[in-house]
């Protein structure tokens, strides 16, 4: 597992909370790159997981990169879905969570080669739903965190449900 913290033109220092969550994430993911992404004036912490394996029954490629954009008030609020750098076919019997559009306020990054996937913990992307169902804990290894987000996304992306 490699965690790389990339520097952009802004000074980026991960918080102690983020560092602890990255240590949990390294147990379930490989090749993690951490940086920042500014979109429409909002600066997100970008968590890139390179080479996530994909189901051969569902996809014509063996892996994809996955991007989570953590909002400025993370972990109080989770990211809105995640992004894949693979433009999977969304027509016909496709996965209705993979729309090639972004919804619920998630940044639209298709022009940059990132395609939004509607997945999250807590059942929805309404702020009231988040506040009632997204459950991070003061203890990083309890409750929701980057590892639980990644495992949920990996399962949803690869599942036929």
Image: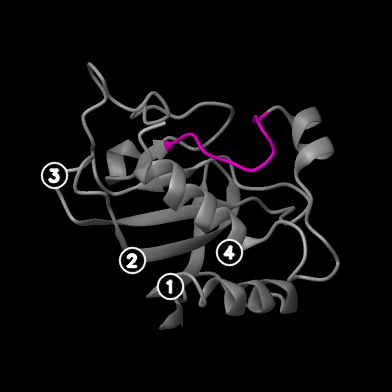
| Residue, disc 4 | 147
Q: Position of residue 127 (x, y in %)?
A: 75, 31
**Magenta stretch bounds:** 117-125
State the SS at label 1. Answer: strand
Q: Which mark is residue 50?
A: 2
State the SS at label 2. Answer: strand
Nearer the N terminus, badge 4 or badge 1? 1
Label 1 CA crowd tier, 10 Å (few <14, some 14–19, many 20+): many
On the picture, is 18 further left or further right than 80?
A: right
Nearer the N terminus, badge 3 or badge 1? 1
User: How many angstroms separate mark 3 from mark 1 (CA)?
Assistant: 23 Å
| Residue, disc 3 | 60
- The reply to whether discs 2 and 3 touch (Cβ–Cβ < 8 Å) is no
The quadrant holding residue 93 is: top left
Tell me what residue is drawn at x 42 percent, y 35 percent: 108
Q: Position of residue 121 (x, y in %)?
A: 64, 43
């Amino acid at each position: 597992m490699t965690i790389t913290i990339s520097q952009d033109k802004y000074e980026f220092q991960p918080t102690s909370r983020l560092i602890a969550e990255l240590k949990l994430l390294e147990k379930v993911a490989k090749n993690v790159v951490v940086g920042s992404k500014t979109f429409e004036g909002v600066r997100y912490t970008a968590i890139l997981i390179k080479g996530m394996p994909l189901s051969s029954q569902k996809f014509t490629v063996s892996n994809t990169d996955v991007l989570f954009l953590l909002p400025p008030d993370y972990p109080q609020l989770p990211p809105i879905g995640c992004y894949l750098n693979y433009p999977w076919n969304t027509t016909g019997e496709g996965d209705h969570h993979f729309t090639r559009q972004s919804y619920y306020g998630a940044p639209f990054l298709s022009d940059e080669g990132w395609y939004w996937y509607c997945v999250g913990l807590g059942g929805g992307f309404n702020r009231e739903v988040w506040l009632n169902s997204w459950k991070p804990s003061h203890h990083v290894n309890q409750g929701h965190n980057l590892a639980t987000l990644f495992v949920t996304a990996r399962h949803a992306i690869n599942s036929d449900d």
